[in-house]
Image: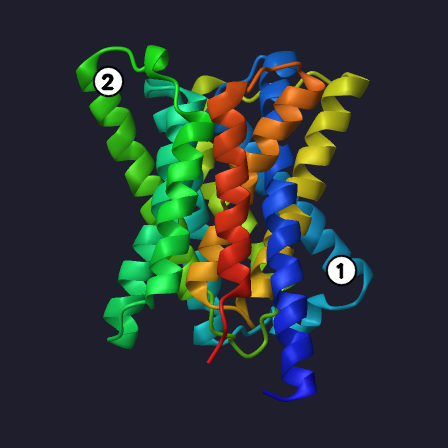
Amino acid sequence: MSVLSSARVRAGSISLVVAGVLWGTGGLAGSILASEAGLHSLAVAAYRLLLGGAVAVLFLGLTGRLGGIGVAAPTKPVVRRVLAAGVLLAVFQAFYFASVTLTSVSIATMTTIGSAPVFVAIGGALVDRRWPNPATLLAIAGAIAGLVLLTWSPQETGESWTLLAGVLAALVSGCGFATLTLVTRKEVAGLDPLRTTAFGCVVGGILLLPAAAWFGMALPLRVEVVAVAAYLAVVPTALAYAAYFRGLRDSPAVLAALSALLEPLTAALLAAVVLGDRLGVLGWCGAALLAASIAAGYRRPRR
């Protein structure tokens, strides 16, 4: 491996770590926005994608990079990639929040994010006609076990049919995220990570608008509400997805999906530090196992 390619791999890995950590702050910001503004979770998801996409589009415009994708006459590959990213982002967000409503944040997060690396491994094996090596499978298993210990709350399961519906919704969400990872891992001429983020988020937000409008999207124009909405749009959405799509270019899809597991880890640690939530012995053991499994995935040699 050349020095240049090694540098690209390191940069891609750093981008994935940054994305996972920034996503972890989004849960806390989204819950604060929902509480302060009295918004349904679907409205929060729609605002997240629309505002995040708008911020990225504005940045592209201010830096003179909008014309690079040929807005007047975009190519078919560009249109297909943007539409695919938008649809998959909308599916991922909508079914995740549906699972949250039916079960709990912990169960929805554990099932969605925990299933994503499994779906990516299966999808990658079908596409590449080669199963992941034992080290990768061990890292996935360890990460999922750590996630279970970190987030599982049996007392929050509710009725059996509700739990089943919520878990199925979370699995659809995880499959959507895995598909997004597999679909966007190859570059398309005229689309860089920021452009993919900008227009993918806008399309996804538009798709969520009808359902979000049904539940109400009135946003109180108070300083604290606007500040949280702006943070949610810029940091865990525009910056995080741009970093994720950047990292995908030089990293295996399974590693990218494992990086997403940093989201619940970061969220749990933030909740413990900022909100005073207690993880307990099992929770801290799960956090350590999850971090170790992700680190093992990063240290796995590349061909």
Q: Quadrant of residue 194?
A: bottom right
Q: Is residue 190 above or below residue 231?
A: below
Sequence-earlier tag: 2 or 1: 1
* Residue 123 in view: yes
Asked if residue 299 lies left or right of residue 4, the reply is left
Residue 61 is marked as: 1
* Residue type, mark 2 in image: Thr
- Secondary structure at numbered mark 2: helix
Q: Quadrant of residue 12?
A: bottom right
Residue occupying image coordinates x 59% and y 47%: 20
In-front residue for pair 22/273:
273
- What amino acid is found at the position of numbered circle 1 in the picture? Gly
Where does the N terminus fall, quadrant-wise?
bottom right
Residue 232: x and y in percent read 66, 35
x and y, in percent, of residue 246 in the image: 61, 64
**SS type, badge 1:** helix
The crowding category of the residue bearing disc 2, from other C-alpha atoms within 10 Å (few below 14, some 14 to 19, many at least 20), is some
Q: Is residue 114 left or right of residue 292?
A: left
**Residue at x 39%, y 32% (from the top left corner):** 148
- Mark 2 to mark 1 CA distance (whole Å): 45 Å
Residue 211 can be seen in this image: no
Q: Residues within 10 Å of mark 1 (few under 14, many from 20)?
A: few
Q: Is residue 220 above or below residue 99?
A: above
The location of residue 215, given as percent across then percent down, is: 45, 19
Q: Nearer the viewer, mark 2 or mark 1?
A: 2
Say which mark, if any, is on residue 162.
Answer: 2
Which residue does the image show at 52% across and 69% down from the upper left?
251
Residue situated furthest left in the rendering: 161
Labelled disc at residue 221: none
In this view of the protein, which residue sits in the foreground, 224 or 293? 293
- Horizontal side, residue 297 vs residue 124: left or right: right
User: How is this picture coloured?
Assistant: rainbow
